[in-house]
Amino acid sequence: MTALKSILIVALAGYLGLLAIMYVLQRTLMYFPDKVHTAPADAEFPQAREVKLTSVDGTQVLAWTVPPQPGKPVVVYFHGNGGSLQHRVPRFKPLVSDGTGLVALSYRGYGGSHGSPNEEGLIADGRAAYDFARKTYPDAKIVLWGESLGTGIATAIAAENAIAALVLEAPYTSTLEIAQAHYPFIPVRWLMKDQFHSSERIGKVKAPVLILHGDRDTVIPIAHGERLYALAPEPKKLVRFAGGDHEGLDRFGALQAARDFMAKL
């Protein structure tokens, strides 16, 4: 009995220690920024210019922008939790090739931007990017495009601002639910700081919504995209990519699907 009690005490101490470590390190497990500052020209994207934006808390962040041609929308782009803007250049180039404009945000802590990432800060950065697009390109329709982690930011901005459309690529209902699926043995709901509840915000969006999701996505299963689609108001469209995983959906037609969607705005 004494041996069993000792084992239980050691096991409990180990579990509590694991919880403490994961609580302290949770943002390093959630955000994987490439912090290197790379100018658009150095990333082989000379069409873009780099601008500095200031979030409401004073944090300076960077964005790359390409002006839209007359009659074309401007896409405010929110990338995923890893890398930086330079890793999205293979998408940005064809995106702007037809005259579509771009404002691609480098979040705090990413690619030359100041600060450290957290939910409140990233959404503040997103507001700064939206405000820049609205003021700089007042005649252009604004389309918010979120990729993976960025879908939560895009949805938050769309829920509180006038936009022409919202594109969500591999979205989640909340990062809380993703974490609960990955760590079922941890009381994530009580420990997780950045929960990005898109399912609670999507109903407030007053613009057409396009959801793009691969049916073999193992990072954010397509069930999340389907649930967001069910919660989103009309008009809306869900495109499922057979064989598509979490990344590389342009190989399955994601960019073209977004082009076709934006052409009807």
Image (cartoon, rainbow, N blue to C red):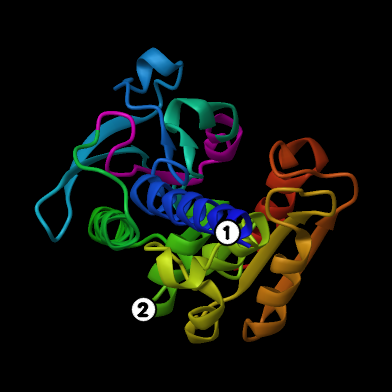
Q: Residue 17 colored magenta?
A: no
Determine if residue 145 is in view. no
Query: For the view shown, which residue lies furthest in the left direction?
Result: 58
258 and 108: which is toward the camera:
108
Give the amino acid type for the residue marked by disc 1 in the picture: Thr
Q: Which residue is mark 1?
A: 2
- Position of 196 compared to 193: left or right? right
Give the amino acid type for the residue marked by disc 2 in the picture: Glu
Residue at image position (73%, 47%) is 254
Q: Position of residue 176 (x, y in %)?
A: 53, 66
Mark 2 vs mark 1: which is more N-terminal? 1
Query: For the view shown, which residue lies furthest in the front direction?
Result: 2
Q: Position of residue 215 (x, y in %)?
A: 84, 54
Q: In the image, is residue 248 above or below residue 170?
A: above
177 and 245: which is toward the camera:
177
Q: Position of residue 28 (x, y in %)?
A: 40, 40
Residue at image position (82%, 41%) is 252
Q: In the image, is residue 36 above or below residue 245?
A: above
* C-alpha gap between disc 2 and disc 1: 59 Å
- Which element type, helix, strand or loop, lies under badge 2? helix
Q: Which residue is mark 2?
A: 160
- Which element type, helix, strand or loop, lies under badge 1? helix
> Residue 238's quadrant in the figure?
bottom right
Segment colored magenta: 92-112
